[in-house]
Image (cartoon, grey):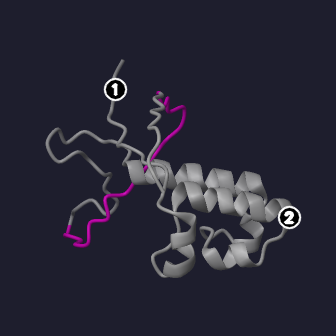
């Protein structure tokens, strides 16, 4: 497989409701906050991690494809591809090609190739 082209898509996310992406602090201190928000280590401003954006886009594509009931809401895997036929199989293969497959499915994942999408972090913009 050879990289032929890189396309960049930019956009702006406008929050019209609340958003909480937890920082996953392991330690709970007396009188401390139990549900912290992920913040940039240098600016201490909240941001949306690229991994959260990637996960949301993937879950929306899986929902739109109609494959989510089959996986009970879990991300698609290579074994799900084996049980699909027709249009479902086509959707499943496309999603796995775009977002990649689990490292546990090494042989069959190699046939799909590497993940074809990368998401950057989304910083806070007050404008």
C-alpha gap between disc 1 and disc 2: 44 Å
Residue wearing tag 2: 86
Q: Nearer the viewer, residue 73 or 46?
A: 73
Which residue lies at the image location 51% right of the left edge and 63% below the top edge? Answer: 113
Secondary structure found at label 2: helix
- Residues drawn in magenta: 12-30
- The numbered mark at residue 53 is none
- Image coordinates of residue 77 in percent, x first then y, are 61, 73
User: Is 47 drawn above or below residue 28 in the view shown?
Assistant: above
- Image coordinates of residue 105 in percent, x first then y, are 53, 80
Which residue lies at the image location 71% right of the left edge and 56% below the top edge? Answer: 63
**Most distant residue in the front direction:** 2
- Image coordinates of residue 66 in percent, x first then y, are 79, 59
- The numbered mark at residue 125 is 1
Quadrant that contains the C terminus: top left
Secondary structure found at label 1: loop
């Amino acid at each position: 497989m050879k990289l032929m082209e890189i396309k960049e898509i930019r956009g702006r996310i406008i929050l019209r409701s609340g958003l909480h992406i937890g920082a996953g602090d392991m330690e709970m201190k007396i009188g401390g906050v139990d549900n912290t928000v992920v913040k940039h280590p240098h600016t201490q401003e909240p941001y949306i991690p690229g991994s959260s954006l990637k996960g949301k886009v993937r879950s929306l594509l899986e929902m739109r494809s109609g494959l989510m009931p089959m996986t009970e809401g879990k991300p698609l895997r290579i074994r799900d591809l084996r049980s699909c036929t027709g249009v479902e199989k086509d959707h499943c293969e496309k999603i796995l090609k775009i977002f990649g497959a689990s490292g546990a499915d090494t042989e069959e994942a190699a046939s799909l190739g590497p993940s074809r999408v990368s998401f950057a972090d989304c910083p806070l913009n007050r404008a």
